[in-house]
Amino acid sequence: MKKAALRIWVGIVMFTLSGCVAGTTFEVAKIDPATGLFKARKVLDPKNILVEEKIPVQKYKQAILLLVDGDRSKYQEFWKGSFENMGFFDNVLLVDDFERYLIQKNLATQFDDIKSMMTLNKIQKEIGDFLVAQIDYENESDVKLELKITDPGTGKIVFKAKNIYLFNEYYWTGIDYDGCLFYPVFNEVFKWIKNNSK
């Protein structure tokens, strides 16, 4: 009886501390007009924002290419829809989209491995400035997300953030990957874009 009571008490504490309750997973959301951000259930810890370069982001507005890690590519429409809903980039492109984009510009036969940063550097010289976002998502007991944005013209990482959704958070309260893992990172990307667009 004491052990059961202890488990209930720990559950209540974790619920209170986490601020994350059962919610959506891989559901594309619109920006909340009241805040100008996604409806995240928590704010990303500043120490998890690893790189925030000041760049004239407007010059990259024509496109962002999304590179999704491994088998997590099955969620690529979620990543794409989320970036589209930020409303900044003229084109949010997955790899297939990017290939079609190059075909339309009669450049398809000039490049082979379009995921290579060397190739992307050459493509940028042909089509103009764009950014590349690499999304690494690891779903184990603790769920991890890392998102980095690179300028292929220089090879420099201009934005990088990570987030972790601890097993102890969602074990007691239910899973909300979107509100607790993804949207906090997306919001920091969006704030970085807006701050560099001024």
Image (spheres, rainbow, N blue to C red):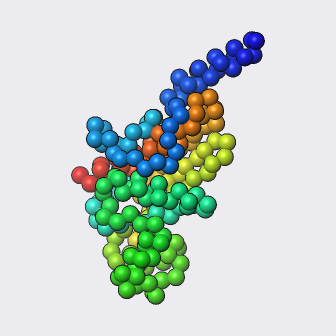
**How many numbered marks are there?**
0
Residue 5 vs 88, above or below: the answer is above
Measuring from the top left, give residue 28's x and y in whole percent: 43, 50
The residue closer to the viewer here, 30 or 195, is 30
Q: Is residue 56 left or right of residue 166?
A: left
User: Residue at 39% across / 50% down in the picture?
Assistant: 189
The image quarter in which residue 107 lies: bottom left
Q: Is residue 106 left or right of residue 135?
A: left
Is there any visible trace of residue 15 in the rendered image? yes
Measuring from the top left, give residue 198's x and y in whole percent: 23, 52
User: Residue at 52% across / 82% down in the picture?
Assistant: 112
The residue closer to the viewer here, 76 or 184, is 76
Measuring from the top left, give residue 113's x and y in whole percent: 53, 78
Residue 10 vs 130, above or below: the answer is above
Measuring from the top left, give residue 191's x and y in whole percent: 34, 47
User: Residue at 45% across / 35% down in the picture?
Assistant: 41
Is there any visible trace of residue 180 in the rendered image? no
User: Farthest left residue?
Assistant: 198
Which quadrant is home to the N terminus? top right
User: Residue at 66% across / 46% down in the picture?
Assistant: 140
The residue closer to the viewer here, 45 or 62, is 62
User: Farthest top residue?
Assistant: 2
